[in-house]
Structure formats: C-alpha cells, structure tokens
C-alpha cells in the first residue's frame, strides 16, 4: 500500500458521515488477543516476536478476510510513516514507538486494522464514522470469528481471553466513541460530565488514546472494565451514555447561541480569521481553532465552510500528513509555516473548495 | 468508624491514569477514583494529588494501620509511582507532612537530569514497607520465568500461563479492577482453541522452548532434540497444518 496515496483520502474516522456526526466523530471497537504458544510481547525475545509476527501474518492472509487486507511492515517504516499511521488512528502510538517485528493489516476502507505485536500479539480494531457502535461490533465479531478459525487464542475457561495486562482480560474489548464537545468545554460543564462518567466506570481519554491530552475538544469515551459482562453488554454500556452526552452538548450549544451569541460568534469568527491569515501556526493551535470553527459551522455562524472540509483539515494539518502532502521532511518551524500556508491556500479556494494540493 | 457501604473505600487518584497505573494501583489494593487531575471525591484535604509527579496521597477511612515511623495511626497512605515502580508509605499526619514537604523541597532543589542520573537511594526513595516486602513474591512462572514482583513493577504479565501460576495473587487484583472474576462473554467456537486444555498444552511450548535453549547451550543435543520433538507434537496437535511451528534448534 502506498502511504502517499492514503494521504490524499481522509480515512474512516474523519469522513464526517453517519448518525449524529455533528457530535460523534467515530465509533470504535477493539479486541485484544494473544496466541497461546508464545510469551506476551513485553516478555518475548526478538525471535519470538518475529515468529509471532510471521505466524499471525501468514495465518490471517490465508483467510477470506485476509484477501482484502494490505499488510504494512511497521518495523521497517520510517518514523514519519509510522507517525502518519498514528495520525490516521490505524496504529497506536505505542505500536509506532515499539521495537522489533510488528505490523498492521488494513482494509481499503480503513475501517479494519489488525495490529500485530502491539501490547498484545493481536489487536483487532474496527472503526465506523459517526455513531455506529453496533455496526462496528458486528463487523469486528465477524473478523474475530475468521481469525479464530486459524489461530489458537490464549483462553482460560474462567478468565476468558488472556491478555498481557489484566485490565483487558476477559472479553479483551474496548468500546469507544470519539466526541466533539466544544460547547461543554466553553460552558465549563465538561468536568462534571467526566466525573459522572467515571462513576459509571467509563474512561475519558484524549484524541490519541491512553495518556494523550484532549486536543481541540475531542474526547474518547470508553469502557473501563472488560471482565464479568458480555461484549454486547459492554457495547451497550458505552452506547447508552452517548445519547445523553449528545443531548448535553446540544443543549450547551443552544445555550451558547441563546445567551451569548455575540461572544460565541466573535470567538468562532476570530478562530476562522486566524486560520485564514496566520503565517505560522502549531498543530495544537490549529486543532483548537478548527474545533471552534467546526462548532461555528454547526451553529450556523459560519456559512461558507463544510464540515467534511474541517474534518479533513484536522488530519491533514498534523505533522506527518503535512509532510507527506508536501513530499518533504520539515522541522517544527518549517512545518508551522507550511501548515499556515496550507490553511490559507485551503480557505482561499472559496466556499467548500477542496484543498488544491498536489 | 463504621465500615458501612457508604464509607469511602480505598481510593487512589493519579493524574491521567494509564494501564500501568491502574495495575499498580490494583496490585497495591487501591481503587482509582478519577482518571483526571484531581480526586474529586477526596477533595478537601483528605487527598493530596500531584499529577505531575504521579503521586497520590490519601486518607481512606476503611484502613487501619500504624504509621511506619511511630505508634500513631497512619492516616496518609502515599503511593509513589516512578517509572512504573510503586512505593507505598503509611504515615501519621505529622510524618506525612514532613515527608511530603521534604520530598517537595528535594524535588525543587534538583534539576530533572540530576534526579534522573542519581541511583535509587536518593532523597526521594524510601525503602519498601513491610507490607510490600510481604507481597514481594519471588515465585517465577514455570513457562516464561517472570516473577510476580516483576509483574507488579511492569504491570504486564509474561505469558498466558501466568494466569494459572499466579491465580491466587491475580484473583483479588482482577476482582479489584473489574469487579468480577468470571468471563461471561464470547468463547472460541473453534474446536481446538476452545478447549481448556488447548491453551494449557500450548503454553507448555513456551517452557519447552526455554529448556531446549538451555540444553543447546549445555551442548546436550540429544535432550534438545527430544524437546524439539515434544514442541512439534504439541504444535501439530493444536495448530494443524500451517506455516507455523517450524522450530530451528
């Protein structure tokens, strides 16, 4: 697979379609699996890792599922290419930064990704645009069924699927939704929301998972426990809370428009102004401003921008994407200048024009 | 104080908990109460949380033990998390205050590089508590060789067999993390790996491989050959024909 070709598309999670996609960016389910006849990755020798990688790669390639997958040898990628896959959420940051034999198999839609030798031997991920946990779960279950036919998973009659970290044991499932919650942030209700989520055993994380900062008002909500409840129950647990959060965010947006329209209009217009005119800008600031503009568009305060364009800019202005699109490696300073130029060029194109990047 | 269901149980608050922290916390018997920067439930002087240094100090009402330095009751239970290692202290109010002040001062007086280059034993490092020593279990897994102590420090298990070998130690930890100890979800439907003995049998290969390596380094090739055959027999039984399982001793 040519990674450069991928850079031209925006991938599943930023497609900006699907139910409730004004607030729910994407729905994701992942399963942690290990083969029984090798040590877990952190205790595996270099040879073990290479054996596991080959075993899983070859076995998966032999399934009907495998026919539609592209395999990328992550261990051999340049740093910028690994970062690129992280930005597209096809591999985790840990997987990018790990050592030894490892890889990822991706389907053409970028919905399915199979990480080999992450924290566990196999991490199956399935991502759908918008709110569609059920669809993501149905798809991943079918993927898991196919792999299970050819791979002996480590399984314990009482503890279920065995994982390197006991926090994942049992179902090995992590169900998550990525939400854009700018109005809850502006109205300072977000902490209260997180507190109540935590009380019902849901975790809140930033854009790129564990340990990452919440950037641009994007948050991942996921289940915290994996044992004692069935996969369907856990999908439901996360799924049940999403409409409530959507409702909170909608009400906060309405409140902003009703009570502080001038302020909000000013904020989003300034954000838009900076994005269109800045000469140098960091990835973080870009993310923050795009988040505000995204809200402005959804509130009808900015008329000539499409949500799909904002979503696309969210990923294309990230460091590795920016460099891939330009075809050269840039240091931080040059990236900031290039990013600002890219944004200006994009917005100059007029209403909803696609970015004119070669 | 009555230990009714309403009293706050063991609690832990660390800024931005990662899986390592959660495991370390559970292994130490603490229950996390927030993934964010403050312990909301323990606010108001009952808990001191320092996310930047990954430390939590808190005083739950349900634990009774003596201060490590005097006979007073320990009311502060401090967990230090540094590069994945867990250190617990149980102190009375006075000793807790002087400990926290002292380590705070020590931290300010040192640059990052200095503290990083110092060997363990610097001013921030306090010896392991009796509790922790009691927990320090040097028993190793028969298959992968990891000790429970290593697991406690790293937060990651070594192989599937650890769940069998350390079941006694892991069960309370798993109960603490998940609030349950029984898997009720999907099971492998495929005949082979669905059977309980499949995993048991296959994890045996991990130990056999290790023994085979040892035989080779002893130049006991006959034994190495037997071990290789044993590995192949198990792999043939469970893995079926496939590109896997070719050992090269």
Image (cartoon, coloured by chain):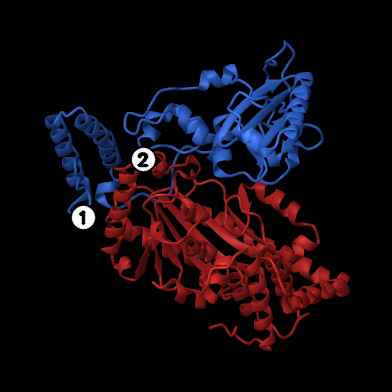
Chain colours: A red, B blue
Badge 1: how crowded within 10 Å, few (<14), some, or many (20+)? few
Dividing the picture into quadrants, the one containing residue A247 is: bottom right
Check the image and name the residue furthest to the left: B222
Q: Give the chain of mark 2.
A: A
B93 left or right, relative to A117 = right
Q: Residue at x 75, y 27 (%)?
A: B100
Q: Position of residue A60 (x, y in %)?
A: 30, 60
Q: Nearer the viewer, residue B130 or A141?
A: B130
Q: Position of residue A181 (x, y in %)?
A: 70, 64
Check the image and name the residue furthest to the top: B71
Q: Position of residue B40 (x, y in %)?
A: 75, 42
Q: Is residue A315 above or below residue B232?
A: below
Q: Residue at x 45, y 60 (%)?
A: A125
Of helix, strand and loop, which one carries label 1?
A: loop
Which residue, given by chain and number where applicable, does mark 1 sit on?
Answer: B243
Visible residue check, residue A245: yes
Of helix, strand and loop, which one carries label 2?
A: loop
Which residue, given by chain and number where applicable, does mark 2 sit on?
Answer: A157
Q: Nearer the viewer, mark 2 or mark 1?
A: 1
A296 left or right, relative to B216 = right
């Amino acid at each position: 697979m040519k990674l450069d070709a991928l850079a031209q598309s925006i991938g599943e999670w930023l497609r900006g379609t699907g139910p409730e996609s004004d607030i729910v960016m994407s729905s994701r389910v992942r399963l942690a699996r290990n083969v029984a006849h090798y040590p877990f990755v952190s205790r595996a020798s270099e040879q073990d890792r290479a054996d596991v990688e080959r075993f899983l790669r070859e076995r998966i390639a032999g399934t009907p599922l495998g026919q539609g997958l592209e395999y990328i040898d992550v261990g051999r990628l340049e740093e910028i290419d690994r970062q690129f896959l992280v930005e597209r959420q096809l591999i985790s940051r840990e997987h990018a930064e790990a050592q030894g034999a490892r890889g990822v198999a991706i389907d053409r839609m970028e919905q399915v990704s199979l990480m080999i030798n992450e924290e566990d031997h196999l991490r199956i991920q399935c991502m759908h645009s918008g709110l569609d946990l059920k669809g993501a779960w149905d798809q991943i279950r079918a993927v898991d069924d196919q792999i299970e036919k050819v791979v002996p998973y480590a399984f314990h009659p009482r503890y279920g699927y065995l994982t390197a970290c006991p926090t994942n044991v049992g179902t090995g499932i992590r169900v998550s939704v990525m939400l854009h919650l700018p109005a809850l942030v502006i109205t300072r209700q977000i902490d209260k929301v997180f507190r109540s989520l935590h009380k019902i055993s849901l975790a809140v994380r930033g854009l790129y998972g564990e340990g990452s900062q919440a950037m641009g008002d994007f948050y991942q909500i996921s289940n915290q426990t994996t044992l004692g409840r069935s996969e369907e129950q856990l999908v439901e647990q996360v799924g049940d809370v999403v409409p409530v959060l959507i409702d909170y965010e909608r009400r906060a947006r309405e409140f902003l428009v009703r009570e502080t329209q001038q302020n909000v209009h000013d904020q989003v217009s300034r954000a838009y102004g900076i994005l269109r005119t800045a000469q140098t800008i960091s990835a973080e600031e870009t993310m923050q401003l795009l988040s505000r503009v995204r809200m402005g568009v959804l509130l009808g305060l900015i008329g000539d921008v499409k949500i799909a364009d904002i979503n696309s800019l969210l990923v294309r202005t990230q460091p590795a994407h920016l460099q891939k699109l330009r075809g050269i490696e840039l240091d931080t300073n040059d990236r900031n200048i290039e990013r600002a130029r890219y944004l200006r060029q994009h917005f100059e194109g007029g209403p909803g024009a696609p970015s004119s990047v070669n | 104080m009555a230990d009714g269901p309403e009293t706050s149980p063991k609690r832990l608050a660390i800024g931005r908990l990662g899986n390592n922290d959660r495991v370390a916390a559970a292994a130490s018997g603490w229950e996390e109460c927030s993934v964010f920067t403050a312990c909301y439930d323990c606010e108001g002087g009952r808990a001191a949380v320092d996310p930047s240094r990954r430390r939590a100090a808190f005083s739950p009402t349900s634990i009774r033990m003596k201060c490590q330095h005097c006979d007073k009751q320990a009311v502060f239970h401090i967990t230090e998390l540094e590069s994945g290692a867990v250190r617990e202290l149980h102190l009375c109010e006075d000793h807790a205050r002087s400990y926290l002040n002292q380590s705070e001062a020590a931290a300010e007086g040192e640059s990052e590089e200095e503290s990083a280059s110092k060997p363990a034993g610097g001013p921030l490092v306090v010896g392991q508590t009796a509790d922790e020593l009691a927990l320090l279990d040097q028993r190793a897994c028969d298959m992968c060789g990891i000790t429970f102590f290593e697991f406690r420090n790293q937060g990651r298990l070594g192989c599937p067999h650890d769940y069998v070998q350390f079941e006694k130690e892991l069960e309370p930890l798993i109960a603490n993390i998940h609030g349950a100890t029984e898997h009720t979800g999907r099971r492998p439907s495929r005949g082979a790996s669905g059977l309980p003995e499949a995993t048991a049998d296959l994890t045996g290969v991990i130990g056999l491989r290790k023994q085979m390596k040892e035989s080779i380094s002893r130049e006991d090739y006959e034994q190495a050959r037997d071990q290789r055959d044993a590995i192949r027999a198990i792999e043939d039984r469970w893995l079926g024909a496939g590109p896997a399982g070719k050992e090269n001793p």
